[in-house]
Image (spheres, rainbow, N blue to C red):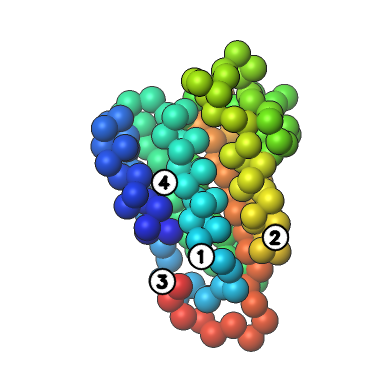
Amino acid sequence: MSYAAEAFQPLFNERQLNLEVQIEPDLPDLMIDRERIEQVLSNLLSNALHHTPAGGRVVIHAGKVQDAVQISVQDSGEGIPSDKLTYIFERLYRVDESRTGDNGGSGLGLAIVKSIVEAHGGSVTAQSEVGKGTNITIQFPKPLNSPEKAA
């Protein structure tokens, strides 16, 4: 998680955005492909970067929730209208249909996020409020008999 944040930090600085990483201590080890999860985080950070105005804030948080590890990326950006929120994980879907690949991405990022997370036995959800920001939450089940160690 720190690697993705470090890679994006110069871009956040350039856009005058505050990027915070909050990792709870003693997270259990997960059976995940670290490279793919870095891709997930990169997609989420890229979205937050592009949809949060200067002076805004993005927080990556990782912690334990019951029998799972939860990672969230929360921004103080423009937010997503509630009627469009249910579609954001679909392939080629863009909240703003006027955006094209030249100025708005391919519409694949969140579909890829969902695919990778689900391939790891996890789930992904989104909450958003227009004008206040978006929170994407990923949850991975903790392996049975997992030792409680720092990740």
- Quarter of the picture containing the N terminus is bottom left
Q: Nearer the viewer, residue 8 or 62?
A: 8
Find residue 44 and report its horizontal and vertical position in percent. 51, 43
Q: Is residue 110 above or below residue 21?
A: above
Cα separation between marks 1 and 4: 20 Å
Type of the residue with mark 2: Ala
> What residue occupies the far top of the structure in this picture?
98
Give the mark, 2 or 3, whose residue is nearer the N terminus: 3
Q: Which mark is residue 94?
A: none
| Location of residue 85 (image quadrant) | top right
Q: Nearer the viewer, residue 105 or 130?
A: 105
Say which residue appears at 38% left-offset and 25% top-offset. Answer: 53
The residue tagged 3 is 25
Q: Which mark is residue 34?
A: 1
Give the mark, 1 or 4, whose residue is nearer the N terminus: 1
- Helix, strand or loop for disc 3: loop
